[in-house]
Amino acid sequence: MSKKDSSGVAQILAYLNEKNRPYSAQDVFTNLQKQCGLGKTAVVKVMDQLAQEGKIKEKVYGKQKIYFADQSQFADVSDAELKKMDSRIAEISTEVQTISQSCRQLDTELKELNSSLTTAEMKAQIQELQAECSGYRERLDKIKSTTNHVTPEEREKVSKEREIYVKEWRKRKRMVSDMVGAILEGYPKSKKQFLEEAGIETDEDHKVTMPNI
Protein backbone atom coordinates (compact mmCIF):
# COMPACT_ATOMS: atom_id res chain seq x y z
CA MET A 1 0.00 0.00 0.00
CA SER A 2 1.42 3.38 -0.95
CA LYS A 3 2.03 6.19 1.57
CA LYS A 4 -0.90 8.08 0.08
CA ASP A 5 -3.21 5.08 0.49
CA SER A 6 -2.06 4.56 4.09
CA SER A 7 -2.76 8.19 4.85
CA GLY A 8 -6.17 7.85 3.23
CA VAL A 9 -7.03 4.82 5.37
CA ALA A 10 -6.12 6.70 8.54
CA GLN A 11 -8.09 9.76 7.50
CA ILE A 12 -11.22 7.79 6.59
CA LEU A 13 -11.09 5.77 9.83
CA ALA A 14 -10.60 8.93 11.89
CA TYR A 15 -13.43 10.65 10.04
CA LEU A 16 -15.92 7.84 10.66
CA ASN A 17 -14.97 7.62 14.34
CA GLU A 18 -15.21 11.38 14.78
CA LYS A 19 -18.59 11.79 13.09
CA ASN A 20 -19.96 8.50 14.46
CA ARG A 21 -22.81 8.31 11.99
CA PRO A 22 -23.57 6.11 8.96
CA TYR A 23 -22.11 7.02 5.58
CA SER A 24 -22.02 5.51 2.12
CA ALA A 25 -18.75 5.33 0.22
CA GLN A 26 -20.02 8.15 -2.00
CA ASP A 27 -20.63 10.33 1.07
CA VAL A 28 -17.13 9.76 2.39
CA PHE A 29 -15.58 10.35 -1.04
CA THR A 30 -17.48 13.65 -1.38
CA ASN A 31 -16.68 14.85 2.13
CA LEU A 32 -12.99 13.89 2.13
CA GLN A 33 -12.09 14.36 -1.53
CA LYS A 34 -9.90 17.39 -0.87
CA GLN A 35 -8.35 16.08 2.33
CA CYS A 36 -7.25 12.59 1.37
CA GLY A 37 -7.07 12.96 -2.41
CA LEU A 38 -8.29 9.41 -3.11
CA GLY A 39 -10.53 8.56 -6.03
CA LYS A 40 -13.96 7.04 -5.49
CA THR A 41 -12.77 3.52 -6.35
CA ALA A 42 -9.93 3.80 -3.86
CA VAL A 43 -12.31 5.05 -1.16
CA VAL A 44 -14.59 2.04 -1.72
CA LYS A 45 -11.64 -0.32 -1.42
CA VAL A 46 -10.38 1.38 1.76
CA MET A 47 -13.79 1.16 3.43
CA ASP A 48 -14.21 -2.49 2.46
CA GLN A 49 -10.76 -3.18 3.85
CA LEU A 50 -11.55 -1.40 7.13
CA ALA A 51 -14.79 -3.39 7.43
CA GLN A 52 -13.01 -6.68 6.78
CA GLU A 53 -10.42 -5.82 9.44
CA GLY A 54 -13.24 -5.09 11.91
CA LYS A 55 -12.20 -1.47 12.38
CA ILE A 56 -15.57 -0.23 11.12
CA LYS A 57 -18.98 -1.86 10.61
CA GLU A 58 -21.02 -2.20 7.47
CA LYS A 59 -24.67 -2.86 6.62
CA VAL A 60 -26.07 -3.75 3.22
CA TYR A 61 -29.37 -2.24 2.12
CA GLY A 62 -30.24 -3.60 -1.30
CA LYS A 63 -27.37 -2.64 -3.58
CA GLN A 64 -25.95 -0.03 -1.23
CA LYS A 65 -23.50 -0.48 1.62
CA ILE A 66 -23.56 1.76 4.66
CA TYR A 67 -20.48 2.10 6.86
CA PHE A 68 -20.22 3.37 10.44
CA ALA A 69 -17.82 3.39 13.36
CA ASP A 70 -17.44 0.34 15.59
CA GLN A 71 -19.64 1.26 18.57
CA SER A 72 -17.79 -1.05 20.96
CA GLN A 73 -14.93 1.45 21.15
CA PHE A 74 -17.15 4.13 22.66
CA ALA A 75 -18.13 4.38 26.31
CA ASP A 76 -21.75 3.73 27.21
CA VAL A 77 -23.86 6.85 27.58
CA SER A 78 -26.36 7.05 30.43
CA ASP A 79 -29.98 8.10 30.00
CA ALA A 80 -29.21 11.32 31.88
CA GLU A 81 -26.38 12.14 29.46
CA LEU A 82 -28.62 11.36 26.48
CA LYS A 83 -31.32 13.67 27.83
CA LYS A 84 -28.71 16.37 28.36
CA MET A 85 -27.50 15.92 24.77
CA ASP A 86 -31.08 16.02 23.46
CA SER A 87 -31.70 19.22 25.42
CA ARG A 88 -28.54 20.80 24.01
CA ILE A 89 -29.50 19.73 20.49
CA ALA A 90 -32.92 21.37 20.95
CA GLU A 91 -31.27 24.58 22.17
CA ILE A 92 -28.89 24.66 19.22
CA SER A 93 -31.74 23.94 16.79
CA THR A 94 -33.69 26.89 18.22
CA GLU A 95 -30.62 29.12 17.89
CA VAL A 96 -30.15 28.01 14.29
CA GLN A 97 -33.80 28.79 13.48
CA THR A 98 -33.51 32.22 15.10
CA ILE A 99 -30.30 33.04 13.25
CA SER A 100 -31.73 31.78 9.95
CA GLN A 101 -34.80 33.95 10.41
CA SER A 102 -32.60 36.97 11.18
CA CYS A 103 -30.52 36.26 8.07
CA ARG A 104 -33.65 36.09 5.91
CA GLN A 105 -34.90 39.36 7.38
CA LEU A 106 -31.54 41.07 6.82
CA ASP A 107 -31.45 39.71 3.27
CA THR A 108 -34.90 41.17 2.62
CA GLU A 109 -33.85 44.54 4.05
CA LEU A 110 -30.68 44.51 1.95
CA LYS A 111 -32.68 43.86 -1.23
CA GLU A 112 -35.04 46.71 -0.36
CA LEU A 113 -32.12 49.06 0.26
CA ASN A 114 -30.44 48.06 -3.00
CA SER A 115 -33.64 48.72 -4.94
CA SER A 116 -34.46 52.06 -3.26
CA LEU A 117 -33.34 55.51 -4.37
CA THR A 118 -30.25 57.14 -2.89
CA THR A 119 -30.57 60.33 -0.87
CA ALA A 120 -29.21 62.35 -3.81
CA GLU A 121 -31.72 60.78 -6.19
CA MET A 122 -34.59 61.45 -3.79
CA LYS A 123 -33.55 65.11 -3.42
CA ALA A 124 -33.43 65.48 -7.20
CA GLN A 125 -36.92 63.99 -7.56
CA ILE A 126 -38.27 66.20 -4.77
CA GLN A 127 -36.94 69.32 -6.50
CA GLU A 128 -38.42 68.18 -9.82
CA LEU A 129 -41.81 67.49 -8.25
CA GLN A 130 -41.69 70.80 -6.44
CA ALA A 131 -41.04 72.63 -9.72
CA GLU A 132 -43.99 70.85 -11.34
CA CYS A 133 -46.27 71.70 -8.40
CA SER A 134 -45.17 75.32 -8.63
CA GLY A 135 -46.16 75.33 -12.29
CA TYR A 136 -49.56 73.91 -11.45
CA ARG A 137 -50.09 76.58 -8.79
CA GLU A 138 -49.24 79.30 -11.29
CA ARG A 139 -51.73 77.93 -13.79
CA LEU A 140 -54.40 77.69 -11.12
CA ASP A 141 -53.69 81.29 -10.01
CA LYS A 142 -54.07 82.50 -13.60
CA ILE A 143 -57.33 80.64 -14.00
CA LYS A 144 -58.68 82.09 -10.75
CA SER A 145 -57.59 85.66 -11.58
CA THR A 146 -59.03 85.82 -15.10
CA THR A 147 -61.87 88.35 -15.57
CA ASN A 148 -62.76 87.44 -19.14
CA HIS A 149 -66.23 86.12 -19.79
CA VAL A 150 -66.24 82.39 -20.31
CA THR A 151 -68.85 80.15 -21.79
CA PRO A 152 -70.40 77.27 -19.81
CA GLU A 153 -68.41 74.86 -21.95
CA GLU A 154 -65.16 76.64 -21.14
CA ARG A 155 -66.10 76.79 -17.48
CA GLU A 156 -66.74 73.04 -17.49
CA LYS A 157 -63.42 72.42 -19.19
CA VAL A 158 -61.59 74.56 -16.66
CA SER A 159 -63.40 72.82 -13.80
CA LYS A 160 -62.32 69.41 -15.07
CA GLU A 161 -58.73 70.60 -15.55
CA ARG A 162 -58.78 72.02 -12.04
CA GLU A 163 -59.92 68.65 -10.70
CA ILE A 164 -57.10 66.88 -12.58
CA TYR A 165 -54.50 69.36 -11.33
CA VAL A 166 -55.66 69.19 -7.72
CA LYS A 167 -55.59 65.38 -7.83
CA GLU A 168 -52.09 65.46 -9.32
CA TRP A 169 -51.06 68.07 -6.76
CA ARG A 170 -52.29 65.85 -3.91
CA LYS A 171 -50.61 62.78 -5.44
CA ARG A 172 -47.26 64.48 -5.90
CA LYS A 173 -47.40 66.13 -2.49
CA ARG A 174 -47.91 62.67 -0.98
CA MET A 175 -44.98 61.32 -3.02
CA VAL A 176 -42.74 64.12 -1.76
CA SER A 177 -43.91 63.52 1.79
CA ASP A 178 -43.13 59.78 1.48
CA MET A 179 -39.68 60.48 0.04
CA VAL A 180 -38.87 63.01 2.76
CA GLY A 181 -40.06 60.51 5.38
CA ALA A 182 -37.80 57.82 3.91
CA ILE A 183 -34.80 60.18 3.98
CA LEU A 184 -35.50 61.29 7.54
CA GLU A 185 -35.29 57.66 8.79
CA GLY A 186 -31.53 57.84 8.33
CA TYR A 187 -31.12 61.61 8.66
CA PRO A 188 -29.51 62.83 11.91
CA LYS A 189 -31.30 66.19 12.01
CA SER A 190 -34.89 67.38 12.19
CA LYS A 191 -37.33 67.57 9.28
CA LYS A 192 -37.20 71.37 9.32
CA GLN A 193 -33.39 71.35 9.11
CA PHE A 194 -33.47 68.85 6.24
CA LEU A 195 -35.98 70.95 4.27
CA GLU A 196 -33.86 74.06 4.78
CA GLU A 197 -30.61 72.34 3.75
CA ALA A 198 -32.24 70.73 0.71
CA GLY A 199 -33.84 74.02 -0.32
CA ILE A 200 -37.32 72.53 -0.27
CA GLU A 201 -40.24 74.91 0.12
CA THR A 202 -43.60 73.56 1.21
CA ASP A 203 -47.12 74.74 0.50
CA GLU A 204 -47.27 75.91 4.09
CA ASP A 205 -44.20 78.12 3.56
CA HIS A 206 -46.17 79.96 0.88
CA LYS A 207 -49.41 79.80 2.91
CA VAL A 208 -50.99 77.75 0.13
CA THR A 209 -53.86 75.46 1.02
CA MET A 210 -54.77 72.60 -1.28
CA PRO A 211 -58.35 73.17 -2.49
CA ASN A 212 -61.05 70.54 -2.24
CA ILE A 213 -62.06 68.88 -5.48
Image (cartoon, rainbow, N blue to C red):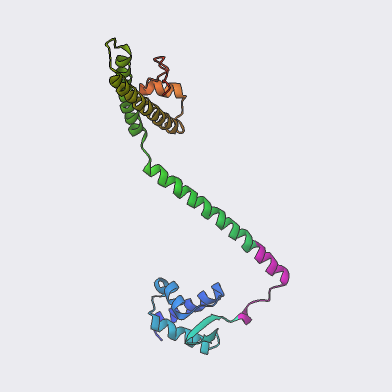
In percent of width and height, residue 45 lies at 43, 86
Vertical placement of residue 31 versus 198, above or below: below
Residue lying at the far top in this picture: please name it. Answer: 147
**Is residue 3 at least partly visible in the picture?**
no
In the rendered image, residue 81 lying in the magenta stretch gets the answer yes
Q: Which image quarter is the C terminus in? A: top left
Q: Quadrant of the N terminus?
A: bottom left
The structure residue drawn at horizontal position 37% and vertical position 33%, both measured from the top left corner, is 119
* Dominant secondary structure, magenta: helix
- The x, y position of residue 75, in whole percent, is 66, 76
Instruction: Classify residue 137 as left or right of residue 96.
Output: left
Give the image location of residue 195, x and y in percent.
Answer: 40, 22
Observer-nearest of 26 and 5? 26
**Residue 47 picture location, percent across and down:** 48, 84
Number of on-image labels: 0
Q: Is residue 38 magenta?
A: no
- Above or below, 115 against 11 in this view is above
**Camera-side residue: 23 or 11?**
23
The residue range painted magenta reads 71-87
Q: Residue drawn at (65%, 66%), measured in percent from left and top? A: 86
Front residue of 206/122: it is 206
Asked if 146 appears above or below 176 in the picture, the reply is: above
| Picture layout, residue 130 above or below residue 67 | above
